[in-house]
Image (cartoon, rainbow, N blue to C red):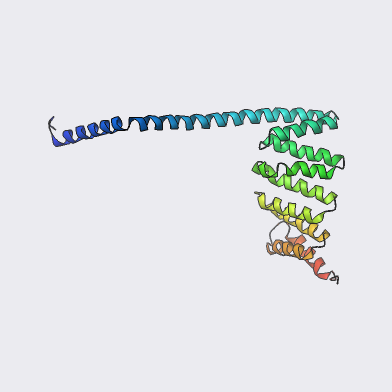
Amino acid sequence: MTSPTSPTRTRYGADEQSLSDWFMLHQREVTWGAVILAAIVGGFWFYERSQSIKAQRAETAYFQARQSAAAGNLPKAVSDLDKVVNRYEGTRAGAQAALSLALAYYDQNKFKEGIAALKKVESKTPEDFRASVHVLEAAGYEQLKDFGSAAEQYKLAAQVTRFPADKAQYQASAARSYTEAGKVAEAKAIWTELAKDETGPMAAEARVRLGELEATPVKI
């Protein structure tokens, strides 16, 4: 049995005293540290809570805007969707509203306005909506016969999608648009890469397109 005056007990007592002395000497720093930690934790909770409330409100606003579209009131739908896009940017509902707004403009043959609506949310769209935004922009450019810009948007969609099959399809769409734009070299480069993956979903078309481009006389 260890005696009350053993070296071990004495050492523990000294450690406790040293720790107590340290807290006494650094009481102010310890207090401020606790306050800062509490503020960080509280701030994180508040941020998460506010983001959750914002997302809920955005979903409600988007649903109401869709009701206007379903009722056939296109001007009100456009107005309501635009408000959702501006007020709730960065949310999933805000991204959905931007896509719906662009489609509403496209239905009216207002392709420039639809593209502009999508451009506003490009950089702040949640990751799982980014490819859709770029693809819909590409569709708008195609309607404007701006195939070079359409190809660039398809390439961006291919870069951000998480799904290999979708990536191949977007790359193929980019190659087709480059061909329409007269940018044969760019189209060939994409088709060549797609043809290398013999088991890929676009490999067969890639080989056909390459054959067509090789057979096309070069215009001087």
In this rendering, the answer to whether 211 lies above or below 118 is below
- All told, the count of numbered labels is 0
Front residue of 107/195: it is 107
Check the picture and name the quadrant holding the C terminus.
bottom right
Q: Nearer the viewer, residue 157 or 38?
A: 38
Q: Is residue 53 at least partly visible in the picture? A: yes
Q: Is residue 169 visible?
A: no
Q: Is residue 112 above or below residue 177?
A: above
Residue at image x 56%, y 31%? 47
What residue is rendered at 74% in x and 54% in y? 152
User: Residue at 20% across / 32% down in the picture?
Assistant: 13
Residue at x 71%, y 41% (from the top left corner): 121
Q: Is residue 122 left or right of residue 42?
A: right
Q: Is residue 175 left or right of residue 48?
A: right
Image quadrant where one finds the N terminus: top left
Residue 173: x %, y % from top left: 77, 55
> Residue 144's x, y, as percent?
85, 50
Give coordinates of residue 59: x percent, y percent.
Answer: 69, 30
Tell me where residue 197 sits by quadrant: bottom right
Give coordinates of residue 64: x percent, y percent.
76, 27
